[in-house]
Amino acid sequence: MLNLIKDLFLDTGHLNKDGIRIHNEKDLAEMRRACKLAADTLDMIGNHVEPGVTTEKLNTLCHEYMLDNGSTPATLGYRGFPKSCCISINHVVCHGIPSTKRLKENDILNIDVTCILDGWFGDSSRMYVAGQATKKASRLIRVTHDALMRGISVVKPGNTFGDIGEAIQQYVESKKMSVVRDFCGHGVGTTFHSAPNVLHFGKKNTGAVLQTGMFFTIEPMVNLGRPETKILADNWTAVTKDKSLSAQFEHTVAVTTEGVEVLTLSPMDKFFPSSKIS
Ligand code: MF3
Ligand code: CO
Ligand code: CO
């Protein structure tokens, strides 16, 4: 017997015509747990970001927190990545490797964690500040955060991935900043990175159509200068070519019949570092 409910059920656990996995309610319950743990980890680490601390120390704290809560850090050993989170300071765009380098006053940094809990991946990143952010850095952080939220605001069944890209790009460029093209968001679930590529630029009404049951990340990287990046000799660290400051925020979201559920919201409302910003 075919009815709407049955059709939806038959579709779950399958790839749609664009190769994007459509999940069911049970998957969503699992995904909520993994994503909440990523958000809890990012809440926890915020209390330790201050001038003088090494990024290695922040990495260890994230590593232990994830393990203590029954999860494993997805980045550790992923394609040879050596650490349990990525920490990207100032002109580092993404994939910075934690090290013995100490934070100094005014540094801005992105910490990106992915927890694997019972086989499900929760992926999120936020900006933090050592001490207080300069005016320029504050503006960059605010615009990057708002760009992510504008992208999320157009997530609902029937809209397209191009709608997300356009919402982000239009906003960022209206503020005379630039969107990085070399990295994108991604499908996520029982694997770290799956279809589709979620571009942070583009044209509305293009790309795959959003469907209830999709899980993916939106994670715009925004530069104060030009969008071009290059990879350092460690084969991971991506930096702005012109050495301008860069920022990034990342949420994992689910498309629902109502529109969107943001799975990596901060339980303590710490997603945006308000108190560190001028
Ligand atoms: N968490 C990153 C993302 O948002 C991926 C990091 S992969 C690593 O997709 F190997 F650099 F850790
Ligand atoms: Co991601
Ligand atoms: Co991430």
Image: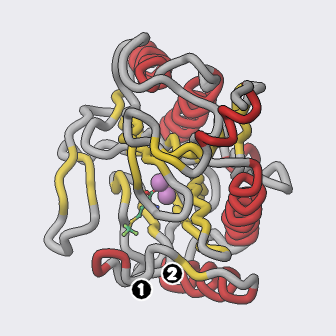
Is 178 left, or right, of 107 in this rendering?
Answer: left
Colouring style:
secondary structure
- Marks 1/2 in contact by CB < 8 Å: the verdict is yes
Mark 1 and mark 2 lie on one chain; the one further toward the N terminus is 2
The residue identified by callout 1 is: 100
**Which amino acid, mark 1?**
Thr
Q: Position of residue 134 (x, y in %)?
A: 54, 43
In the rendered image, the quadrant that contains the N terminus is top right
Q: Residue at x 57, y 51 (%)?
A: 13
Q: Tell which of 172 and 214 is nearer to you.
A: 214
Vertical placement of residue 89 versus 56, above or below: above
Q: Amino acid at mark 2?
A: Thr
Distance from label 1 to label 2 (Cα)? 5 Å
Please rate how many residues cluster around mark 2, counting C-alpha atoms within 10 Å: few if below 14, some from 14 to 19, many from 20: some
Name the image quarter holding the C terminus.
top right
Residue at 58 percent across and 82 percent down: it is 72
Quadrant assignment for ligand 1: bottom left
Tag shown at residue 54: 2
Query: Callout 1: 10 Å neighbours few (<14), some, many (20+)?
Result: few
- Number of numbered discs: 2
